[in-house]
Amino acid sequence: MEKQYRWFKVAESAAELFNTGRQIVQVKAAGREVCITRHQQELFGCASKCPHAGGRMADGWVDPLGN
C-alpha cells in the first residue's frame, strides 16, 4: 500500500518562514507543532521535540552538512 500524505499550508513562502534569521522554525499544522528547516535551498520537516533529550528542535541548528 502506497503511503498517503496530507499537505498543510503554513506560510505564503519560504521567505516568510525564515524572515527572523532562525535556521529552524516551529509552526502549527493541523493542530500539531512541527519544525521546518532549509538546507541547500530545500525545505525539510521534522518533529518539534527532540526524541533523545526532549528539547525543542527549533532551539537547535543545522550544520553545513545538513545534520
Image: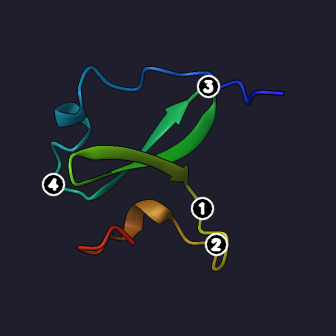
In the picture, measured across the screen, residue 43 lies left or right of residue 22, that is right
Question: Where residue 10 appears, x then y in whole percent?
Answer: 41, 26
Q: Secondary structure at mark 3?
A: loop
Q: Residues within 10 Å of mark 2 (few under 14, many from 20)?
A: few
Q: What is the three-letter code of the residue carrying label 4?
A: Gly
Mark 1 vs 2: CB contact within 8 A: yes
Q: Residues within 10 Å of mark 4 (few under 14, many from 20)?
A: few
In the picture, measured across the screen, residue 66 lies left or right of residue 50, that is left
Mark 4 vs 3: CB contact within 8 A: no
Q: Which comes sooner in the sequence, label 4 or label 3?
A: 4
Question: Where residue 29 appears, x then y in whole percent?
Answer: 54, 29
Mark 1 vs 4: CB contact within 8 A: no
Q: Secondary structure at mark 1?
A: loop
Instruction: Determine the CA span between mark 2 and mark 3.
Output: 22 Å
In the picture, measured across the screen, residue 8 lies left or right of residue 62, that is right
Q: Which comes sooner in the sequence, label 4 or label 2?
A: 4
Q: Residue at x 51, y 34 (%)?
A: 28
Which numbered disc covers residue 49? 1
Q: What is the three-letter code of the residue carrying label 2?
A: Gly
Q: Which comes sooner in the sequence, label 1 or label 2?
A: 1
Q: Secondary structure at mark 4?
A: loop
Q: Which residue is mark 3?
A: 30
Q: Residue at x 29, y 73 (%)?
A: 65
User: Quarter of the image holding residue 62?
Assistant: bottom left
Q: Which residue is mark 2?
A: 54
Q: Residue at x 41, y 47 (%)?
A: 44
Query: Which quadrant does the C terminus fall into?
Result: bottom left
